[in-house]
Amino acid sequence: MSETESKEIIKDKFLDKLWSDYRYSISRIDEQSLIISSGALGISLTFVKEIVPLKASIHTGLFFAAIICFAFTITVGFINHMFSARSILKRYIILNNTDFSKTDASVKERLNPWIGRINLALTLSLIVGIVLLITYCIINIYNYKQTGI
C-alpha cells in the first residue's frame, strides 16, 4: 500500500466519523432542548405553584433571574447548535475536497472559535440559573416555615 493510499484511507475514516458526528448532533437537538427547558422551567413553575406561591414568596428577583438564565441557555444553545452543525458540515466539505498529499492551510483552521466561547457562556448561564433557583427555593422554604404564610 502506498503512502497516498494510506492517507486516503485515513481521510475516508475521518470523513465518516465527522459525518456520523454531524448526523448525531442534528438528531439530538430537539431532545436536548426539550429536556433542558422542561426540567428547569418545570421545577421552577412547580415550586411557585405548589410549594410557595409567587404572591407569598420573597426575593422574587432571584426567581425571575433564574428563569432568564434558563431561557437564555435554551435559546442561545439552540442557535449555537446550528453554528456547530454548520461548522462540522463545512469542515466535512473542506476535507472531502482536500488533497492530503499537499499541505492545505484551510484544513488546519479551527472550526469556529465562537462555538467554544458560546458553550462556556451557556454552561455558566445554566449554573448561575440553577444556583439562583436553589437559593430562591431555600430562602422561600425557610421563610414559609418561619412565617407559615
Image: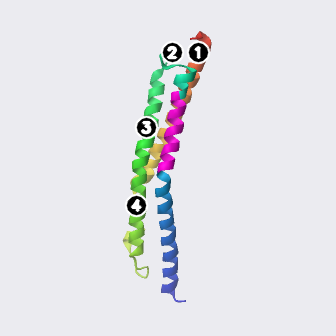
Q: Nearer the viewer, residue 53 or 133?
A: 53
Q: Which quadrant is home to the C terminus?
A: top right
Report the residue marked by disc 2. Answer: 56
Pick whichever of labels 1 and 4 is earlier in the sequence.
4
Name the main secondary structure of what is drawn in magenta.
helix
Pick whichever of labels 2 and 3 is earlier in the sequence.
2
Q: Quadrant of residue 71?
A: top left
Whether residue 109 is visible here, answered yes or no, is: no
Q: Does 65 sit above or below residue 23?
A: above
Q: Residues within 10 Å of mark 1 (few under 14, many from 20)?
A: some
The image's colour scheme reads rainbow
Calculate the distance from the C-alpha at mark 3 to the C-alpha at mark 4: 24 Å
Q: Nearer the viewer, mark 1 or mark 4?
A: 1
Q: Amino acid at mark 4?
A: Ser
Name the residue rendered at 43%, 79% in the picture: 100
* Segment tinted magenta in the rendering: 30-45
